[in-house]
Image (tube, rainbow, N blue to C red):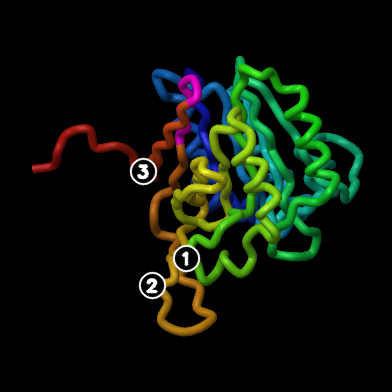
Amino acid sequence: MMLLAQVSDTHFDSDPHNAERVAAVLGYLERLPQRPDAIVVTGDITDRGSLAQYEQACKGLSTDIPLHILPGNHDDRANFRRTVLELPASDGPINQSFSLGLLTVALLDSTIPGEGAGSLCEQTYAWLDDLLARTPADGTVLLALHHPPLPMYSTVVDPIRLRDPQRLEDLVASDERILGVLAGHMHAMGTTLFGGKPLVVAPSVASSIGCAWEVDTPGEVPIDYAPDPAIVLHVVDGSRLTSIVRQVPMGGRIPIQPR
C-alpha cells in the first residue's frame, strides 16, 4: 500500500497568509502516525510567478517527506526551473516522474505560457509515451496535471480547463496500468470518470471557489478565503485507488465533543 498526499494551488504571494496555511498542511502531514510516502503539489505554486514568490515557496514547502511539484497557469516555467528545480531557466514543458515501488507517478506540464487554459503539447505526449513504454507491465501509474480535462461545473475554471482532452482520455482508457488522473486548478474538490478511470480534482490550500450554482451574476468569482485548507490523501492498494479529502483546521483540533 502506498499513501500519496495531494496538495494544490498554494498561491505563494509574498504575504504570510498562504504561507501559514501551507505550514499548517505540512505540519499535519509530518505529524501523521503513518506519513505519506510522497507529496504531490498540483500546480499554481505561486500567484504571479515572480522569483520572490518562488523563493518564499521553496522555503514554505520545505519538508523531509519526499515532495514533487508541477507547474500551474499562475506559474512561470523559467522561474520555476531556476528556483524549484535548480536548473537553467527555459520555457519548455516541465515533465517529471517518480516511482514508489511498482507505482509510477507522471507529473505532466499542462500549462500554456501566458494563458490561463491548459494543453498537453506533442513534446509532453512523446515524453509520456516513453515513460509508459519503460513502465513494467505489472506496474501501476497515476497521471497528475494542473488543468482538469473535463468540465467541473465551475464558471471560473471550465473556460480555462485542459483543451483537446480526447487524446489523453483515449490513452487513459487504453492502458490498464493507469489507475487515475489527479488535477488541481478548481479550488474545490471534484471527482468524476475520465477514460473510465477516476479523475480527482483537489481543493486548494489557499482558498475555495464555488461552482456554477453559487454564481449570481455573469463574471462573478465566488471565491472564499475563510475555509480551512484542504488536501487529498490517495491510497494505492494494488490496482485500487482510494481518495480521501481532509481539511486541516487552522485553529487546531478539538478531540473531545464540546458540551
> Which amino acid does the dot numbered 1 rest on?
Tyr
**Relative depth, front residue between 213 and 11:** 213
Q: Earlier in the sequence, mark 3 or mark 2?
A: 2
Give the numbered dot on residue 75: none
Q: Earlier in the sequence, mark 2 or mark 1?
A: 1
Q: Earlier in the sequence, mark 3 or mark 1?
A: 1
Asked if the residue under mark 2 is in contact with the one under mark 3, i.e. CB atoms within 8 Å, the reply is no
Q: Classify mark 1: helix, strand or loop.
A: loop
Few, some or many residues within 10 Å of mark 1 (<14, 14–19, 20+)? some
Q: Main secondary structure of the magenta part?
A: strand
User: What residue is rendered at 88% in x and 50% in y?
Assistant: 91
Write down the residue under mark 2: 213
Give the numbered dot on residue 153: 1
The magenta span reads 233-239
**Relative depth, front residue between 220 and 177:** 177
Asked if the residue under mark 1 is in contact with the one under mark 2, i.e. CB atoms within 8 Å, the reply is yes
